[in-house]
Image (cartoon, grey):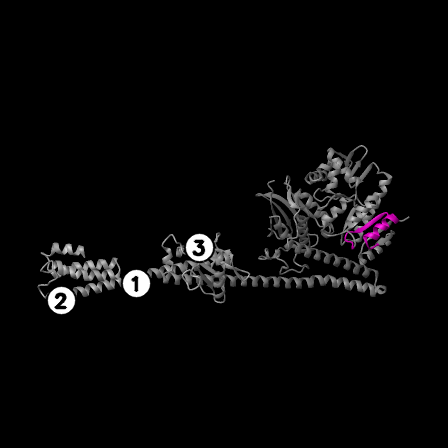
């Protein structure tokens, strides 16, 4: 108003008074844009008064010489009031929009932060950290322990609220209503406690401590901030709820898989255990009841069948026990440095009966370093691989066993010239109870899974590779020991 | 007289087939079901060999070995479950002569029994100075080793190792026992030495060191020199 007055006084000789009124209106617009609504209304009145006082003859009095000016004053006042009111309203809108935007942004950040979180505690911690940022206050989330809220399960390392307020938090948790600072209940508390209420239950309590040093105390208790705080709490609760239901789903899935495993184990068991048992029982009972009438040759055959089938049963039970022990972590590796030659030699020597005079070529590279392994278990891997190779290839077909060093690993290969593994099954054959599609050899599908479990326990890998010219290579790769 | 075997085993079915098999081989058999009874019979009947099951109802089979070794050198053959290398080693280190893992074929058991009985007899007779297995001939008096009638040079430690294996031919020897006898009691933890020496011996004596016929490894337990079955 003062600026407008000075400008008007300087220009009052050159410009008509009505034009000077425009300068005042400009001032009102400036005030309305910068200051509050009351200020701009006040300046509207002041402008009219000043205009009268300084710019309308006779100068420096409120008296008016020409009554036409009364209309000018009235018009000017109306225009000034309208401008100031509208400008103020516009400003309020802008402010609201900014608040809404901040709120939307805060909630968006919350939901995107919690979306990928699969653990309840981690979700709560992320929410608390974000809340501190958004509200400029200290925020802790307390979670229940055995159905009861506990100050021990909290998202910050330090406990920022007095331990005595655990009962307030518990009340909030039980009733699902906020309490504490600036509320109806326990308004003398150090913090404001807001429940994290989901659709079905309350998952925890969010405690807000206004930062007394800064101005934030007032801001956080502003109605829109309070509202935002509550939305924030309920969003966090929803996220936790989702996390929990995801976990329940996962558990169900694992449980179903275990069930499926168990039933495939049972069916494999009932078949593979019963078949040899049936042969043994049949042969033995034949021998017992018809002993006198059987030719010597038949008796010999039946006896051989009993012995073979018993052997098969024994291997199967052995494999099952091994698999169970390997899986339950009951196998302790007894690793030491061994010349590979010794392990290979032992296996080949012991396998002589199964190999039935089949040629097994061994190519062990010269100067192969000693391997740091459990000799019994690695021997079993080689045994299983050779036994498989013998089972799946025509009798008499030669087998190869080779070992060499390559790229920081010792590679041991068992190669055959059998029918090979069907494309796409190279991985699946290492799964428990998996039988190849064209598989007409009897077995429980445990040999290769055991190999894999043992090799992995040694931090190595095992894979099946197709050979050029037909057949399969099983390759074990063991990292060479730096010691 | 035929050798007397004392069988200490609680399972009736296993006793049953062992009775049939041992009887058919012409051995005399004394059976007991508990460790207590077995120990009493071992003392009173003085058997030529004890077949001992490690899982007995009243006492640990290892205790039986310990008690028997307090007063005598009767060969003890342990019947153990598969995969329990620790038990096997414990039994052998306590003085058992050998083991057979269940389930076993009777042929294998009979071979072990024969080897154990033979040892206990030759121990009395004094071993001959010439030992043969496969293409290998060892003259224990002159300390000369020949393969296919050609002399092979062994280092002193290699020779000592071979000598110990020959002394216990047919029987499993634990790594600890071998290390103790060849290198001395302060080296019983250094099994790597032993493996290197065994590998060298195989290279010098075996036709195919990667498939040894005579110097066999008992995985997780020790070694065994297997002379050809005569």
SS class of the residue under badge 3?
Answer: helix
Residue under label 3: A129
Chain letter behind tag 1: A
The tag on residue A135 is none
Q: CA distance from mark 3 to mark 1?
A: 30 Å
Where residue A273 appears, as percent x and y from the top left, is 71, 61
Residue under label 2: A71
Q: Is residue B55 magenta?
A: yes
SS class of the residue under badge 2?
Answer: helix
Question: Residue B126: which quarter of the image?
Answer: top right
Q: Is residue A119 magenta?
A: no
Q: Are marks 2 and 3 on the same chain?
A: yes
Where residue A18 appears, as percent x and y from the top left, is 12, 61
Q: Residues within 10 Å of mark 1 (few under 14, many from 20)?
A: few
Cβ–Cβ under 8 Å for marks 3 and 1: no
Can see residue A238? no
Chain letter behind tag 3: A
B43 shown above or below B163: below
Q: Are marks 3 and 1 on the same chain?
A: yes
Earlier sequence position, callout 2 versus callout 3:
2
Where residue A229 appears, as percent x and y from the top left, is 41, 61
Earlier sequence position, callout 3 versus callout 1:
1
Where residue B184 appears, as percent x and y from the top left, is 73, 36
SS class of the residue under badge 1?
Answer: helix
Residue under label 1: A93
A271 shown above or below B175: below
Q: Residue sitting at 15 percent across and 56 percent down?
A: A5
Nearest the camera: A131 or B99? A131
Cβ–Cβ under 8 Å for marks 1 and 2: no
Relative placement, left or right, of A107 versus A433 is: left
Q: Which segment is the magenta one?
A: B32-57
Q: Which tag is nearer the camera, tag 2 or tag 3?
A: 2
């Amino acid at each position: 108003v003062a600026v407008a007055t000075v400008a008007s006084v300087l220009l009052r000789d050159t410009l008509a008074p009505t034009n000077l009124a425009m300068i005042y209106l400009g001032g009102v617009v400036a005030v309305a844009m910068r200051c509050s609504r009351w200020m701009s209304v006040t300046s509207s009145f002041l402008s009219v008064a000043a205009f009268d006082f300084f710019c309308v003859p006779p100068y420096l009095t409120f008296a008016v010489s020409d009554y036409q000016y009364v209309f000018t004053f009235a018009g000017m006042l109306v225009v000034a009031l309208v401008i100031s009111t509208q400008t103020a309203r516009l400003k309020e809108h802008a402010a609201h929009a900014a608040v809404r935007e901040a709120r939307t942004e805060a909630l968006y950040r919350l939901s995107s932060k919690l979306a990928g979180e699969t653990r309840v505690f981690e979700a709560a911690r992320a929410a608390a950290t974000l809340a501190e940022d958004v509200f400029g206050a200290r925020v802790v989330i307390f979670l229940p322990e055995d159905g009861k809220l506990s100050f021990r399960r909290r998202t910050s390392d330090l406990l920022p609220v007095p331990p005595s307020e655990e009962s307030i938090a518990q009340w909030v948790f039980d009733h699902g209503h906020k309490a504490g600072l600036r509320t109806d209940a326990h308004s003398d508390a150090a913090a404001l406690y807001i429940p994290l209420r989901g659709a079905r239950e309350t998952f925890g309590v969010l405690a807000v401590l206004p930062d007394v040093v800064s101005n934030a105390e007032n801001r956080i208790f502003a109605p829109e901030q309070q509202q935002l705080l509550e939305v924030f709490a309920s969003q966090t609760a929803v996220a936790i709820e989702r996390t929990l239901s995801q976990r329940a789903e996962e558990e169900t899935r694992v449980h179903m898989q275990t069930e499926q495993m168990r039933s495939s184990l049972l069916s494999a068991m009932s078949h593979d255990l019963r078949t040899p048992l049936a042969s043994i029982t049949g042969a033995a009972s034949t021998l017992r009841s018809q002993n006198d009438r059987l030719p010597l040759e038949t008796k010999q055959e039946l006896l051989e069948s009993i012995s073979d089938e018993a052997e098969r049963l024994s291997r199967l039970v052995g494999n099952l026990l091994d698999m169970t022990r390997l899986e339950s972590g009951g196998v302790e590796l007894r690793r030491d440095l061994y010349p590979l030659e010794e392990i290979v030699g032992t296996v080949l020597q012991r396998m002589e009966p199964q190999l039935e005079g089949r040629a097994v070529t061994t190519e062990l590279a010269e100067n192969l370093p000693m391997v740091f392994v459990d000799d019994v278990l690695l021997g079993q891997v080689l045994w299983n691989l050779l036994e498989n190779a013998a089972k799946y290839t025509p009798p008499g077909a030669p087998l190869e066993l080779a070992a060499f060093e390559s790229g920081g690993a010792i590679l041991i290969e068992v190669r055959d010239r059998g029918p090979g593994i069907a494309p796409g099954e190279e991985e699946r054959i290492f799964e428990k109870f998996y039988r190849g599609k064209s598989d007409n050899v009897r077995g429980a599908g445990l040999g290769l899974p055991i190999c894999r479990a043992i090799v992995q326990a040694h931090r190595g890998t095992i894979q099946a590779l197709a050979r050029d010219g037909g057949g399969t290579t099983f390759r074990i790769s063991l990292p060479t020991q730096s010691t | 007289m035929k050798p007397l075997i004392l069988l200490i085993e609680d399972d009736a079915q296993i006793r049953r087939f062992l009775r049939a098999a041992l009887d058919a081989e012409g051995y005399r058999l004394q059976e007991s079901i508990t460790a207590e009874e077995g120990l009493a019979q071992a003392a009173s009947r003085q058997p030529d060999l004890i077949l001992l099951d490690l899982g007995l109802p009243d006492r640990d089979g290892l205790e039986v070995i310990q008690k028997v070794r307090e007063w005598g050198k009767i060969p003890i053959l342990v019947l153990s479950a598969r995969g329990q290398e620790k038990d096997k080693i414990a039994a052998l280190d306590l003085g058992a002569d050998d083991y057979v893992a269940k389930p076993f074929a009777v042929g294998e058991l009979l071979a072990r029994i024969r080897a154990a009985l033979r040892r206990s007899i030759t121990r009395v007779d004094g071993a001959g100075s010439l030992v043969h297995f496969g293409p290998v001939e060892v003259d224990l008096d002159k300390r000369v080793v020949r393969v296919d009638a050609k002399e092979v040079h062994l280092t002193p430690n290699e020779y000592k190792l071979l000598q110990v294996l020959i002394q216990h031919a047919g029987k499993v020897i634990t790594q600890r026992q071998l290390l103790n006898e060849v290198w001395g009691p302060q080296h019983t933890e250094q099994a790597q030495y032993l493996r290197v020496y065994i590998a060298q011996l195989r290279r010098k004596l075996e036709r195919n060191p990667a498939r040894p016929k005579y110097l066999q490894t008992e995985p997780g337990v020790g070694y065994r020199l297997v002379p050809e079955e005569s």
